[in-house]
Image (cartoon, grey):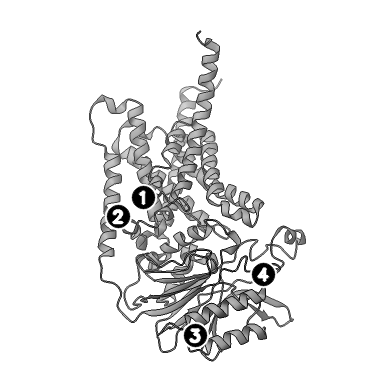
């Protein structure tokens, strides 16, 4: 029996509709697999090729759908750890982030014939433009509203140390740009072969050669950087306490006695190590406000009296003149007499997690969040100093180590090393803490400042100025980590990134706007020309 012609045609129509959708979904899945928990990082170098292929032959309105679909698949899957806190928030945030795939997809569709001409500069312009637009969209996602730079494409390469050393020039955005450039060059070559353009005679693959040259230069620079002599100077020895308290911060569920007992036991054990310079507790390690709690203050004083300063994650209150309290998420340094030396107040608060917009004007909003009142944001980086050590350090709390500008601000203030106090227990058991660590690696390379990461449930570790992760404490286990780092020499010239910030990403944003305006004027001119040739009426 043979299929009816009508059935065959219907099958072709269905295939024509479903294959592009499947390709967009496939791109989202490949991107997801590039990040923790799977960490198949090489997939990121080809993950966008299916999306390129479907958008290169699509109308812009179809490209909007394909780009949004690929972004939704990626972010819904890679942010799935948020479901432990809020399913609605997880889905809303994922769909919001997916919007940033759309300008990239539309650009590819608007310039979909650029690869067909076989004109080298035209094709390279299409490839370069695609990478620039993608990078511009990542930059906008990192700064718009409160900013959410989680899992930028370049972060998937956090274990490829030689490659990511170029972050000291363009930040993590430079890695994203390079990866999209390679994806675009690969897609361009596939399109040219599929259309038969490459069968008309041999021509040098300028697109692929250019991509391979850029990758080679990045790896070469990275190997040279990793071969440099390590930083000189006396190391800082620290004990990082990981108490592994479930859902710390949710005081309705927390057991204060368990928290006090575990902090005291682990800290007392860690203090047996010789030559300790500092003991670190994670974000909101104490179940109350240490400056106003006799129990917490007594615990800190007793443990600090053993001879080692304590850097403590705690909430804090500052009373206004009208007796209204301001609440802060703080990192506090106590000396060996239990006296508070200095506090840092978290600058970047988590929307609906630490502050509620319009809470006084729209009381209903409070009912939709897991917190009862908002924290206040700190205004600046704080410099901490250990006794007898002029090399200062700065603290980043929670997701602040995913925000490049905050680590840069700390380096500008004179920090020779960084500390991240965090608590990812809200999202356990899942891969959120590992993704968090992956993002933190780039702050060390961008600023060339090493970092201690002290966490409640993981990943507790030290990261050096080249992004090497040292001795990670097993996640979701209680314990402590004795480790060290050598602070950076602040007398040496700062990195290009510390001096100029996101200049590379901002340049990509400007170029993207130029591309958009150029296309608008070009299409307008073409329409006017067509109108003159074929006047209406």
* Residue depth check, mark 2 versus mark 3: number of the one nearer the observer: 3
* Residue depth check, mark 4 versus mark 2: number of the one nearer the observer: 4
- Mark with earlier residue (4, 1): 1
Q: CA distance from mark 4 to mark 2?
A: 48 Å
Q: Position of residue 350 (x, y in %)?
A: 60, 63
Q: Which mark is residue 291?
A: none
Q: Secondary structure at mark 3?
A: loop
Q: Which residue is mark 2?
A: 218
| Tag 2 near tag 1, CB within 8 Å | yes
Q: CA distance from mark 2 to mark 3?
A: 41 Å
Residue shown at the point (62%, 65%) measured from the top left: 247
* Residue depth check, mark 4 versus mark 3: number of the one nearer the observer: 4
Marks counted in the figure total 4
Q: Which residue is mark 3?
A: 309
| Tag 4 near tag 3, CB within 8 Å | no
Q: Quadrant of the C terminus?
A: top right
Q: In which quadrant of the rendered view does residue 296 lie?
A: bottom right
- Left/right placement of residue 241 relative to residue 289 reads left
- Mark with earlier residue (4, 3): 4
Q: Which residue is mark 1?
A: 178
Q: Residues within 10 Å of mark 3 (few under 14, many from 20)?
A: many
Q: CA distance from mark 3 to mark 1?
A: 44 Å
Q: CA distance from mark 4 to mark 3?
A: 26 Å
Q: Which residue is mark 4?
A: 254
- Mark with earlier residue (4, 2): 2
Q: CA distance from mark 2 to mark 1?
A: 9 Å
Q: Secondary structure at mark 2?
A: helix
**42 w.r.t. 230: above or below:** above
Q: Residues within 10 Å of mark 1 (few under 14, many from 20)?
A: many
Q: Secondary structure at mark 1?
A: helix
- Mark with earlier residue (2, 1): 1
Q: Secondary structure at mark 4?
A: loop
């Amino acid at each position: 029996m043979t299929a009816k012609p009508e059935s065959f045609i219907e099958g072709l129509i269905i295939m024509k509709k479903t294959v592009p959708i499947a390709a967009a979904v496939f791109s989202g899945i490949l991107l997801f697999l590039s990040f923790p928990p799977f960490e198949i990082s090489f997939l990121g170098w080809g993950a966008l090729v299916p999306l390129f292929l479907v958008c290169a032959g699509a109308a812009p309105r179809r490209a909007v759908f394909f780009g949004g679909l690929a972004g939704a698949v990626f972010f819904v899957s890679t942010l799935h750890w948020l479901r432990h806190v809020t399913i609605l928030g997880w889905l809303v945030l994922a769909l919001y982030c997916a919007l940033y795939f759309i300008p990239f997809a539309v650009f590819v569709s608007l310039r979909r014939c650029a690869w067909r001409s076989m004109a080298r500069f035209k094709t390279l312009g299409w490839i370069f433009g695609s990478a620039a637009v993608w990078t511009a969209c990542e930059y906008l996602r990192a700064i718009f509203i409160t900013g959410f730079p989680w899992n930028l494409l370049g972060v998937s390469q956090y274990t490829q140390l030689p490659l990511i050393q170029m972050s000291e020039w363009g930040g993590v955005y430079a890695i994203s740009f390079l990866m999209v450039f390679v994806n675009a060059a690969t897609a361009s070559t596939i399109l040219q072969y599929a259309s038969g353009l490459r069968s008309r005679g041999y021509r040098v693959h300028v697109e692929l050669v250019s991509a391979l040259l850029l990758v080679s230069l990045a790896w070469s620079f990275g190997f040279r950087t990793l071969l440099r002599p390590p930083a000189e100077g006396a190391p800082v020895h620290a004990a990082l306490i990981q108490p592994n308290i479930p859902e710390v911060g949710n005081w309705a569920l927390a057991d204060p006695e368990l928290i006090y007992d575990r902090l005291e036991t682990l800290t007392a054990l860690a203090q047996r190590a010789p030559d300790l310079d500092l003991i670190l507790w994670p974000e909101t390690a104490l179940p109350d406000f240490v400056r106003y709690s006799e129990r917490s203050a007594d615990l800190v004083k007793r443990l600090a009296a053993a001879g080692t300063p304590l850097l403590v994650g705690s909430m804090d209150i500052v009373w206004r003149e009208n007796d209204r309290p301001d609440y802060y998420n703080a990192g506090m340094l106590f000396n060996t007499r239990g006296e508070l030396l200095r506090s840092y107040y978290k600058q970047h608060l988590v929307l609906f997690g630490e502050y509620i917009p319009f809470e006084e004007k729209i009381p209903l909003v409070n009912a939709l969040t897991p917190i009862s009142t908002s924290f206040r944001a700190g205004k600046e980086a704080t410099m901490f100093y250990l006794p007898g050590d002029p090399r200062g350090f700065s603290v980043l709390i929670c997701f602040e180590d995913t925000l490049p500008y905050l680590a840069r601000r700390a380096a500008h203030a004179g920090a020779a090393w960084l500390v991240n106090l965090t608590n990812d227990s809200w999202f356990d058991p899942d891969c959120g803490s590992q993704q968090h660590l992956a993002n933190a690696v780039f702050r060390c390379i961008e600023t060339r400042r090493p970092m201690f990461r002290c966490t409640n449930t993981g990943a507790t570790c030290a990261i050096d100025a080249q992004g090497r992760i040292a001795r990670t404490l097993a996640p979701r286990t209680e314990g402590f980590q004795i480790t060290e780092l050598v602070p950076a020499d602040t007398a040496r010239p700062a990195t290009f990134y510390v001096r100029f910030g996101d200049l590379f990403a901002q340049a990509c944003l400007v170029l993207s706007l130029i591309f958009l305006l150029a296309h608008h004027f070009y299409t307008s001119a073409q329409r006017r020309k067509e109108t003159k040739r074929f006047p209406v009426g």
